[in-house]
């Protein structure tokens, strides 16, 4: 296990586990450990024998609360032998159990490892809805307590936290963990537009597209879908400028009639040299336009988060293909 650098206090959480410790001289004492983790150090490991794993580095400190100066364990070493537990989101779905990895007995660092399936990620995303991920952790541990006053006096003690603890994984950190898990959301490299007359327009289009991605990550799904529509309109205007097709009115808005769409489709055929490919490009524009129409989402049975993700996916494909087309590097049939 690597040595992890702990972040600021906003991302560090501590959990206290305790239990009774029998003292043959003074009766019952108490032993406790404090487990600390920093969500900035969490990672998602996809190269394990059980598939994808969420890895949570932890450290601990233990102590004995003895109530008499002659108590057997007044000064004692506390070592964690094992940690078990589970975590989940509220009461949604079954809890996910932890495995525990110790680099060697006696160290004060260990890792909690939890297998994560696709259905778990879907459940987390539905609960998170674009915000921080709220988790409930339940942990228990098995401790070895060794008296320093009486070296041969030692006890094995179970400790737990029956009520569990709440921890929020910040949105940005969870998005990076999703990317480690292979769940990237519409991250795409857009080829640059080399035509000087359209370069400024294309910069505006790509900036709005990046805004759409950010709105989606922040859970502002309606705003993300609206930005996708603006991207579609910007692409159509750019194509219109390239091929001298008037697509907007005097106020800069797309014309409401379909004449420009028919004329633009005709230009697609000329540039691409293939009617079927031109029709597919026109269909892609129409699809983004339809999915980004606010009326399309009224009383929809599809969750708006999924509609936003689908709109982003369509928009990224349209951006990529339009850039290739404008640079004269579109794939030929």
Image: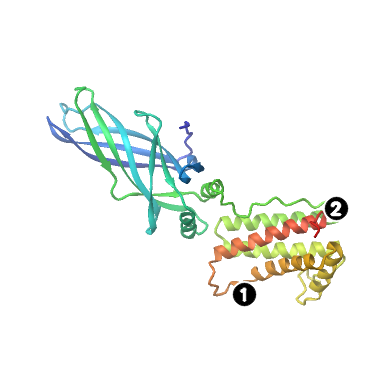
Q: Nearer the viewer, residue 277 or 309?
A: 277
- Which part of the image, by quadrant, shows the N terminus? top left
Percent across and percent down for residue 266 are 84, 70
Q: Is residue 95 left or right of residue 304?
A: left
Compute the Cα span from label 1 to label 2. Answer: 37 Å
Percent across and percent down for residue 58 are 41, 37
At mark 1, the secondary structure is helix
Q: Is residue 91 left or right of residue 222?
A: left
**Residue 258 sits in quarter:** bottom right
Percent across and percent down for residue 71 are 16, 28
Q: Residues within 10 Å of mark 1 (few under 14, many from 20)?
A: few
Q: Is residue 287 above or below residue 167?
A: below
Q: Residues within 10 Å of mark 2 (few under 14, many from 20)?
A: few
Q: Residue at x 55, y 66 (%)?
A: 304
Q: Is residue 10 visible?
A: no
Percent across and percent down for residue 147 are 22, 26
Q: Residue at x 38, y 42 (%)?
A: 99
Provide the residue designation for mark 2.
Answer: 196
Mark linked to residue 295: 1
Q: Is residue 316 above or below residue 245?
A: above
Q: Is residue 62 left or right of residue 305?
A: left
Q: Nearer the viewer, residue 149 or 310?
A: 310
**Residue 253 sits in quarter:** bottom right
Q: Is residue 140 visible?
A: yes
Q: Residue at x 67, y 52 (%)?
A: 188
Q: Nearer the viewer, residue 31 or 57?
A: 57
């Amino acid at each position: 296990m690597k040595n992890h650098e702990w972040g600021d206090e906003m991302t560090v959480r501590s959990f206290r586990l305790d239990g009774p410790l029998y003292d043959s001289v003074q009766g019952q004492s108490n032993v406790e450990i404090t487990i600390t983790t920093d969500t900035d150090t969490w990672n998602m490991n996809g190269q394990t024998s059980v598939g994808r794993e969420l890895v949570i580095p932890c450290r601990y400190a233990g102590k004995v609360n003895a109530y008499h100066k002659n108590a057997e364990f007044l000064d004692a070493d506390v070592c964690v032998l094992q940690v078990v537990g589970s975590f989940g989101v509220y009461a949604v779905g079954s809890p996910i159990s932890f495995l525990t990895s110790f680099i060697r007995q006696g160290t004060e660092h260990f890792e909690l490892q939890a297998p994560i399936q696709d259905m778990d990620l879907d459940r987390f995303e539905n609960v998170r809805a674009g915000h921080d991920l709220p988790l409930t952790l339940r942990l228990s541990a098995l401790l070895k307590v060794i008296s320093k006053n009486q070296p041969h006096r030692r006890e094995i003690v179970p400790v737990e936290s029956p009520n569990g603890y709440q921890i929020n994984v910040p949105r940005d950190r969870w998005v990076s963990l999703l990317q480690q898990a292979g769940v990237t959301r519409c991250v795409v490299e857009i080829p640059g537009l080399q035509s000087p007359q359209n370069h400024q327009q294309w910069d505006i289009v790509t900036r709005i597209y990046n805004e759409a991605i950010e709105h989606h990550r922040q859970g502002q799904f309606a705003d993300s879908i609206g930005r996708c529509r603006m991207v579609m309109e910007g692409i159509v205007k750019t194509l219109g400028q390239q091929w001298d097709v008037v697509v907007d009115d005097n106020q800069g808005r797309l014309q409401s009639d379909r004449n420009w769409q028919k004329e633009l489709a005709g230009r697609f055929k000329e540039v691409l040299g293939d009617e079927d490919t031109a029709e597919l490009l026109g269909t892609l524009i129409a699809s983004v336009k339809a999915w980004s129409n606010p009326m399309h989402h009224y009383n929809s049975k599809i969750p708006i988060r999924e509609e936003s993700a689908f709109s982003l996916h369509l928009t990224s494909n349209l951006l990529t293909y339009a850039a290739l087309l404008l640079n004269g590097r579109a794939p030929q049939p």
